[in-house]
Image (tube, rainbow, N blue to C red):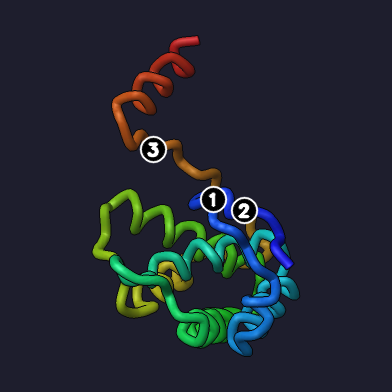
Amino acid sequence: MNLGRCPICHSHLSLEAIVQDDCARELLGLLASLPDDLSRSLVSYLGLWRPAKQDLRWDRALRLAREVLALEGDAARLAWALAETVEAIRLKGGQMPIKSHGYLRRVLENAPAPDAPRPAREIRATSRTAEAMRRLIEGA
């Protein structure tokens, strides 16, 4: 059963192919059981592990997801740390794929307490267009 097309590459998404792989099925079940913000952040983080010229294998993605979820019990704090890690690595033009959870661990160590208010994210310009938009917004 084709679910439709991938919004990025426009290839067909086959539900049968996904559920035939035990690790794929288990990873999707794990992601579905998480709060929305955590599952989105975790998927983005897993994307940092994808080798440059091939796809991330389902079994490796499942193992990495389990390792990450074992790092922190508070879902909101972990989601925040994952989002911060992904943003920081991408803005720095970090080496892809990443090779350890070391940076994520450091972000988690400095993450706000679960009951503390989360700091607002800084708007960072990544291009001349974004910088021009920032100047227009600030000037208004």
Q: Amino acid at mark 2?
A: Arg
Q: Earlier in the sequence, mark 3 or mark 1?
A: 1
Q: Secondary structure at mark 1?
A: loop
Marks 1 & 2, CB-CB < 8 Å contact: yes
Q: Earlier in the sequence, mark 1 or mark 2?
A: 2
Q: Mark 3: few, some, or many residues within 10 Å (few <14, many ≥20)?
A: few
Residues under labels 3 and 1: Cα distance?
30 Å
Left-right relation of 8 to 48: right
Q: Which mark is drawn over residue 137? A: none
Q: Quadrant of residue 53?
A: bottom left
Q: Amino acid at mark 3?
A: Arg
> Seen from this angle, which residue lies furthest front?
1
Residue for point 68% across, 63% down: 115
**Mark 3 highlights which residue?**
124
Q: Is residue 129 visible?
A: yes
Marks 3 & 1, CB-CB < 8 Å contact: no
**Mark 1 highlights which residue?**
10
**Mark 2 highlights which residue?**
5
Out of 105 and 12, give the one closest to the viewer: 12
Front label number (3 vs 2): 2
Q: Secondary structure at mark 2?
A: strand
Out of 70 and 21, give the one closest to the viewer: 21
Residues under labels 1 and 2: Cα distance?
5 Å
Residue for point 74% across, 68% down: 1
> Where's residue 7, x and y in %?
58, 49
> Where's residue 99, x and y in %?
30, 78
Out of 15 and 60, give the one closest to the viewer: 15
Residues under labels 3 and 2: Cα distance?
32 Å
